[in-house]
Image (tube, rainbow, N blue to C red):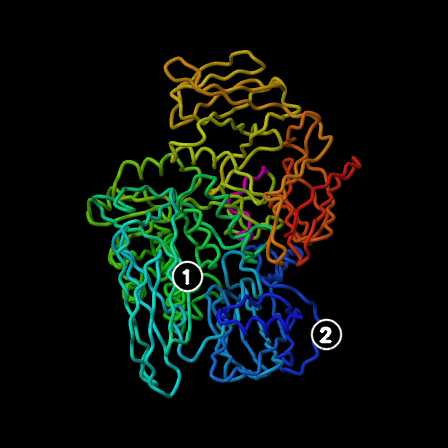
């Protein structure tokens, strides 16, 4: 059926790019003979991309990727797919477009080596035209993630992003061949690169349409010549600008025709927006100053691993947007296309980052092995692919490079920055700089290579740096979560500091133990000092692995956002309650939205009220505890713990403006299932994220519940993942049984191609309680 569908699709004139995710065979382990078209793969597993085989494994203290890779397996795997092409393939160009394969991919068509790419975060094309035939064809992809360690965070393994089959005429728009710039809020300049791969001279019409207006022109294409660039300039007085608050998008429709016959057509989405940056005015978007409340984010999707499901990428940006951020840094790698589309559509600014390091190693087999041969191709892959996204305001070409004290580093930095500017002159270039000693000022020549200088944990150097180099524009590209107030004030008070990017926006797999707290007697120290198994993930994010915003998230958002939340109650775990608390550099004190502290009755407990109001009144069981002025947008109270109801009131000029309560929950008696969406597409690509909560008789979430639960999914969806936010929990995320942590767990289901109802049943073990929810697949 898939082959017949492919034939039907390629009979259509609009079949330039078709999703190629279904019907793959997979086998873990190295099977060199699998590259042959005649290889028998019937016993292999059938799956639909995207796919990350590492997240399917179990946590293992001896895993080669170790703490960096979240103690999950890596290795070598093979993918195969058989597909059919119609008879009339002559005069056509066929390519495979891989959005990301981690890593060292080798692509074979009908047994012949056709291409591949070593860096696992770059998108790439493989021209398969010389190797295909009419009728049945076979693609085989070898993926090698066996050389460890090669990444300082969880990379995942496999074809973890979308794959596309592309068909064009031999006269066509080049790959990533459209560049759209907006020099002002009503002008769009569209440059389209046309390629002629025939042996004849061609005369073609190039037509571009935006917002109902069309510009066209004729161009002559010589055979075997360099590609031709066609430029069309639009003045559109009625268009609306793009910004995080108003993410208005437009589409350029570009058609190439010969003698009235369409040869190629592409669509490119963009936004009308302008950016500027200076030490005097700071960062401006659309001629208005904007402070960047940013977060660093790794590329994984938590319990889903590295698999870049379209819905998961949007869901991640939705969570970060709700948490109050307006900017993200894709630390430290090129993100997925879908992630950037989500940022475009939802309104999120982006620093698009290419590499973690350059020529000197941070890990044995990291990018330093590829740098000299591949850096220019990988930078091109980033900038050419991503330059039309209005969300991207800055390119980043590195992070804390090890060789920063060597003089040749300046030449390298200039080469990287120059290539970015050559490919896209409209955006600034940065790199995240750091010093692990007192030698900071010696990096001035390196800093000078960039338009904006990224400071990792060193923004306290800003005032002295400004005096020494008044023209320098700064942003803190990484900061400690505990420094939220200090960093907010820096950006508020100094125009040459344009933003702060906390490490991190969300918890992530790998870099295991960063941001943790622990108790005296447990393994001490930071995540980089020694292995910390069973910690397998981070806990420095504002948002945990189940999508829950931690108290630090509410505090940070209230600092930066005048609108939205104005009052929030958080309780600090008493020192000694479960053990003497030890925090780490990226950690915050264990603080929760919880008034359940059994066994601590009558003993002092500290709570924080985050508030936009000048003062706060606190009540416990309707008795006034006191009123305090807010300092640094919080009021801190100490009181003897008594179960019941806390109430905080925000006070302005003696008036109660708002109140919030926090209640002691009872014993868990039931569970509540809350899907993020009740309807999903049946295409096999869509997801629903279902929050599972333990609740008491009054329907309150029980924040101390750790009950085990079991999940069953049937009908028009399949089970995908189940997990909690405890970064020491050793249960695999692909197990259908898991325990809760802090009263919560997260279930993810995936549509399976069927139409109708997906039935989800969750059983709370020990109570014989089962609850169901249905998701409609359409």
Q: Quadrant of residue 483?
A: top left
**On the image, which quarter does residue 255 sit in?**
bottom left
The answer to whether 6 appears left or right of 655 in the picture is right
In this view of the protein, which residue sits in the foreground, 182 or 543? 182
Q: Is residue 423 above or below residue 536?
A: below
Was residue 513 drawn as part of the magenta stretch in this picture?
Answer: yes
Q: In x, y percent, where is residue 384?
A: 37, 65
Q: Which mark is residue 34?
A: none
Identify which residue is drawn at 36% across, 43% down.
500
- Left or right relative to 261: residue 451: left
Q: Position of residue 543 (x, y in %)?
A: 52, 42
Residue 212 in picture, x, y percent from top left: 35, 57
Residue 546: image location, x then y, percent: 59, 43
Q: Main secondary structure of the magenta part?
A: loop
The reply to whether callout 1 and callout 2 are in contact (CB within 8 Å) is: no
Q: Nearer the viewer, residue 30 or 446?
A: 30
Residue 412 visible within the image: no
Among numbered discs 1 and 2, the one appearing first in the sequence = 2
Q: What residue is at 27 percent from the left and 36 percent from the top?
A: 493
Q: Give the CA distance from mark 1 to mark 2.
A: 39 Å
The residue tagged 1 is 355
The mark total stands at 2
Say which element carries label 1.
Answer: loop
Q: In the depicted view, which residue is nearer to us: 778 or 136?
A: 778
Instruction: Give yes or no for residue 439 being in the magenta stretch.
Output: no
Which residue corresponds to mark 2? Answer: 42
Look at the image and give the residue range highlighted in magenta.
509-520
| Point 41% across, 71% down: residue | 175
């Amino acid at each position: 059926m898939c082959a017949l569908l492919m034939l039907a699709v390629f009979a259509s004139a609009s079949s330039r790019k078709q999703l190629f995710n279904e019907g793959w065979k997979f086998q873990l382990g190295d099977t060199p003979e699998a590259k042959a078209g005649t290889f028998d793969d019937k016993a292999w597993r059938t799956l639909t991309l995207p796919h990350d085989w590492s997240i399917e494994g179990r946590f293992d203290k001896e895993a080669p990727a170790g703490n960096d890779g979240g103690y999950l397996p890596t290795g070598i795997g093979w993918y195969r797919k058989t597909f059919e092409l119609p008879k009339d393939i002559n005069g056509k160009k066929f390519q495979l477009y891989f959005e990301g394969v981690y890593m060292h991919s080798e692509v074979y068509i009908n047994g012949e080596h056709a291409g591949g790419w070593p860096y696992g975060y770059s998108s790439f094309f493989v021209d398969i035209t010389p190797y295909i035939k009419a009728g049945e064809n076979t693609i085989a992809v070898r993926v090698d993630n066996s050389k460890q360690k090669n990444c300082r965070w969880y990379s995942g393994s496999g074809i973890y992003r979308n794959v596309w089959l592309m068909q064009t005429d031999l006269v066509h728009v080049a790959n990533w061949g459209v560049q759209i710039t907006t020099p002002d809020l009503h002008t769009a300049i569209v440059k389209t690169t046309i390629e002629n791969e025939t042996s004849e001279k061609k005369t073609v019409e190039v037509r571009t349409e935006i917002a109902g207006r069309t510009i066209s022109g004729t161009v002559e294409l010589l055979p075997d010549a360099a590609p031709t660039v066609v430029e069309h300039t639009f003045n559109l007085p009625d268009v609306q600008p793009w910004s995080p608050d108003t993410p208005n998008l437009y589409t350029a429709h570009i058609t190439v025709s010969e003698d009235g016959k369409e040869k190629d057509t592409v669509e490119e989405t963009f936004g009308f927006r302008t950016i500027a940056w200076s030490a005097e005015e700071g960062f401006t978007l659309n001629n208005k100053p904007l402070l960047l409340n940013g977060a660093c984010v790794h590329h994984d999707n938590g319990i889903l691993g590295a698999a870049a499901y379209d819905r998961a990428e949007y869901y991640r940006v939705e969570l970060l947007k709700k948490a109050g951020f307006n900017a993200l840094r894709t630390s430290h790698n090129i993100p997925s296309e879908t992630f950037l589309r989500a940022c475009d559509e939802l309104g999120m600014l982006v620093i698009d980052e290419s590499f973690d390091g350059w020529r000197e190693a941070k890990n044995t087999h990291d990018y330093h092995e590829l740098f000299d041969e591949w850096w220019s191709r990988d930078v091109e892959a980033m900038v050419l692919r991503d330059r039309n996204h209005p969300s991207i305001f800055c390119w980043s070409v590195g992070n804390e490079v090890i060789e920063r004290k060597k003089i040749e580093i300046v030449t390298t930095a200039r080469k990287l920055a120059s290539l970015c500017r050559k490919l896209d002159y409209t955006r600034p270039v940065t790199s995240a700089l750091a010093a692990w000693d007192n030698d900071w000022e010696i990096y001035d020549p390196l800093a000078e290579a960039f338009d904006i200088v990224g400071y990792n944990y060193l923004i306290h150097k800003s005032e002295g740096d400004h005096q020494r180099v008044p023209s320098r524009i700064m942003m803190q590209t990484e900061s400690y979560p505990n420094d939220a107030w200090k960093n907010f004030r820096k950006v508020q008070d100094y125009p040459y500091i344009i933003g702060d990017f906390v490490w991190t926006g969300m918890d992530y797999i790998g870099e295991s133990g960063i941001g943790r707290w622990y108790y005296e007697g447990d393994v001490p120290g930071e995540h980089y000092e020694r292995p910390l198994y069973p910690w397998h993930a981070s806990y420095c994010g504002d948002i945990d692995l189940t999508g829950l915003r931690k108290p630090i998230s509410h505090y940070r958002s209230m600092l930066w956002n005048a609108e939205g939340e104005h009052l929030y109650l958080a309780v600090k775990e008493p020192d000694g309650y479960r053990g003497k608390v030890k925090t780490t550099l990226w950690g915050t004190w264990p603080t929760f939205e919880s008034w359940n502290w059994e066994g601590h009755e009558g003993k002092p407990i500290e709570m924080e009220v985050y508030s936009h109001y000048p003062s706060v009144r606190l009540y416990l069981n309707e008795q006034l505890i006191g009123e305090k002025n807010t300092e640094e947008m919080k009021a801190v109270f100490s009181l003897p713990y008594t179960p019941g109801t806390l109430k905080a009131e925000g006070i302005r000029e003696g008036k109660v403006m708002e109140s919030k309560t926090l209640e002691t929950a009872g014993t868990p008696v039931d569970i509540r299932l809350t899907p993020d969406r009740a309807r999903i597409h049946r295409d096999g690509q869509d997801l629903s994220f279902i929050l599972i909560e333990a609740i008491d008789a009054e329907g309150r979430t029980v924040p101390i519940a750790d009950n085990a639960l079991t999940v069953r999914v049937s009908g028009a969806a399949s089970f995908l993942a189940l997990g909690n936010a405890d970064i020491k929990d050793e249960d695999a995320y692909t197990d259908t049984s898991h325990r809760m942590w802090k009263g919560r767990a997260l279930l993810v289901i995936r549509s399976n191609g069927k139409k109708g109802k997906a039935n989800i049943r969750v059983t709370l073990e020990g109570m014989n309680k089962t609850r169901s929810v249905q998701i409609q697949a359409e």
